[in-house]
Image: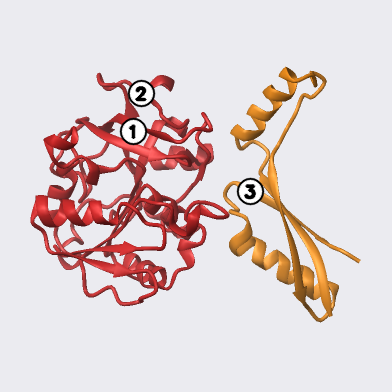
Amino acid sequence: MVIDATVTVRLKDGVLDPQGRTILRSLGQVGFPEVSHVRTGRTFDIRLNAKDRRDAEARLRAMSEKLLANPVIEAFEVTVHA
Amino acid sequence: MRFGVVTFPGSNCDYDAYAALRHVIGAPVEFLWHADTDLHDVDCVILPGGFSYGDYLRAGAIARFAPVMKSVIRFAESEGYVWGICNGFQMLLEAGLLPGAMLRNASLRFSCRWIHLRVESTRTAYTQRCRPQQILRIPVAHAEGNYYADDALLDDLESSGRVVFRYVDPKGTADDASNPNGSARSIAGIINAGGNVLGMMPHPERAVEKILGSADGLALFESLMSADGPDRRSESAVVGQSLDQARV
């Protein structure tokens, strides 16, 4: 079956995110002083062939560990869409 | 000592490394190709600077899977010299041949300038011709050179003498002002436990003649030129191995 999924990769907690820090500062400057925390990341919209959802999830996790994320600094989340 | 410089799509310091070796040092050197798995029996593979595969995803993340890298990893594991400079250092981290990772520069800017390096270890094949704590003036040019490792790993690197270069000011002091990218503990270059794989962000190949602004990079090339081959290296100083075994 064809499955659509989204993988989100972001820096692990505790790893400095220079972009997030700069965006936080900028948000304060352009009228959003209520923002106290920004972390950046990236998303991958992925379409793949898989036996079922579980199979798709396993493959997506494997590809995240191998390529999409660097496990030294990044964490990822896999969401399989209905 | 025969050198091979790998050209990846987007490498742009391969000719600098080639020219430094061939025309300044006078060493035997040839180009290796990213899609080729043959390392042509060289003694040292240089992974050069540049923007391999456009730096897409993460710097070095795609290059790490190039066909040549399978051979490079095997070569490194059999004690061949592998020298990653700038983008090459990023590849070594992505490939797991060296521990840690690179973050965006703390400034978020591409940092292209002359910096000073302090040689933290002269017990490596790459620095044996340097004086202890020697200050080298060498350029950096990168956007992702902010070295990251957790505290336990940093402590291990330090205590095992594997931090080879640190960013310092001209007098040799490491502080925030002399750190061009926010690297943990001002680390500019590290070596693996076997002492054969070196990664560094600064560009020694761009500092090999006075007319370029500095010839301080020569010391590293000359060190390697006088290094022993793998068969004669077994008795040289090799530091603890637990870390790399855990990571690789």
Is residue A75 in view from this perspective?
A: yes
Q: Residue under circle 1?
A: B166
Colour pattern? by chain
**Circles 1 and 3 on the same subunit:** no
The image position of residue A36, as x and y in percent, is 77, 24
Mark 1 and 3 residues: CB-CB less than 8 Å, in contact?
Answer: no
Of mark 1 and mark 2, the one earlier in the sequence is 1
- The chain coloured red is B
What is the secondary structure assignment of the residue under circle 3? strand
Chain A pictured colour: orange
Relative horizontal placement of residue B171, taking residue B102 as reference (left or right): left
Residue at position x 43%, y 52% in the image: B51
Label drawn at residue A74: 3
Look at the picture and state if A76 lies above or below A5. Answer: above
As measured in the structure, the alpha-carbon distance from the residue carrying label 1 to the one carrying label 2 is 7 Å
The image position of residue A80, as x and y in percent, is 84, 64
- Quarter of the picture holding the N terminus of chain B: bottom left
Mark 1 and 2 residues: CB-CB less than 8 Å, in contact?
Answer: yes
